[in-house]
Image: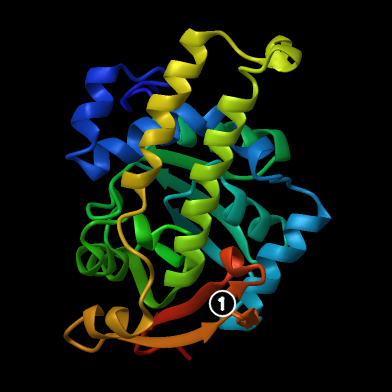
Amino acid sequence: MSSDPAPNPHATAEQVEAARRDPKLANVLYHDWEAGSYDEKWSISYDERCIDYATGRFKLVAGEQGWPYGRALELGSGTGFFLLNLMQGGVAERGSVTDLSPGMVQVALRNAAGLGLDVDGKVADAERIPYEDNTFDLVVGHAVLHHIPDVPAALREVLRVLKPGGRFVFAGEPTKIGDWYARRLGRLTWAATTQLTRLRPLRSWRRSQAELDESSRAAALEAVVDIHTFDPDELARQKDPAGALQLQRVPEQRRRIDEGVPVDAAVTQELGVLQTGDHP
């Protein structure tokens, strides 16, 4: 970690403006800003509740054959939610966390140390994974593909660092309908909260204007960090052209939509597994 850049949790207005034209910079700034409170914001834990969730998603697409994998890598690990809970659930013995955000890698390593897990980490671009060929038995990703500008490049890198017979298992990718409603709800919630706390009875709850300005700058990046929604058919066309990867798609159960009103639409996800052709 000594050679990794330091986190920048307080982006300036100028940096935010530059990030509007640079999705990778946007991801770094936004996730550095969120790193310290990310687990609390999304109710992430490393107990039975989230262990069951993570291993359940993994089993759904990849089964239980081959457990435990010797060494696993997570792309876009954030605070380590997916990989660390998979390791606690017996899916892998050793782990490596990577993320564009130095803040997220820092928190993920701290979480891993607190859990006593054998994990290393690097600040890394998924399109240029900083590990040697044939290093990992398993690569995982949770809600990461939609942040990557060049998904085919990332898949080529995944194939490169996987050992023969290795697997890439991904989950939590937003569908178009879920993404649209999640974004709209987020914008409405932010607007309502900031306006309501201007009212006299609620002013004591209101943070300083400087804090709100900084939060507004970071919140503005949310429209930039999610580059595209997950399209499994497009992913199938983008996978390794040599045919070394086989795609298995397992969509989460879709929620009902009554009269145009989605029911829990924002949690609609896609899951899948890519594996090298000689996987048993």
Q: Nearer the viewer, residue 37 or 255?
A: 255
On the image, the x and y values in percent for residue 182 come to 52, 56
Quarter residue 8 falls in: top left
50 vs 31: above or below? below
Amino acid type shown at disc 1: Gly
Q: Residue at x 58, y 41 (%)?
A: 189
Q: Secondary structure at mark 1?
A: loop
34 vs 271: above or below? above
Quadrant (top left, top right, bottom left, bottom right) of the N terminus: top left
Q: Is residue 157 left or right of residue 55?
A: left
159 vs 98: above or below? below
Q: Is residue 114 left or right of residue 233?
A: right
Q: Is residue 62 left or right of residue 245?
A: right
Quarter residue 14 falls in: top left
198 vs 171: above or below? above
Is residue 152 something that shows in the picture? yes
On the image, the x and y values in percent for residue 254 come to 60, 81
Question: Which residue matches tag 1?
Answer: 260
On the image, the x and y values in percent for residue 154 come to 26, 62
Q: Residue at x 64, y 66 (%)?
A: 91
Q: Residue at x 57, y 26 (%)?
A: 195
Extreme right residue here? Answer: 48
Extreme front residue here? Answer: 200
Q: Residue at x 52, y 34 (%)?
A: 191
Q: Nearer the viewer, residue 8 or 15?
A: 15
On the image, the x and y values in percent for residue 62 come to 57, 81
Quarter residue 49 falls in: bottom right
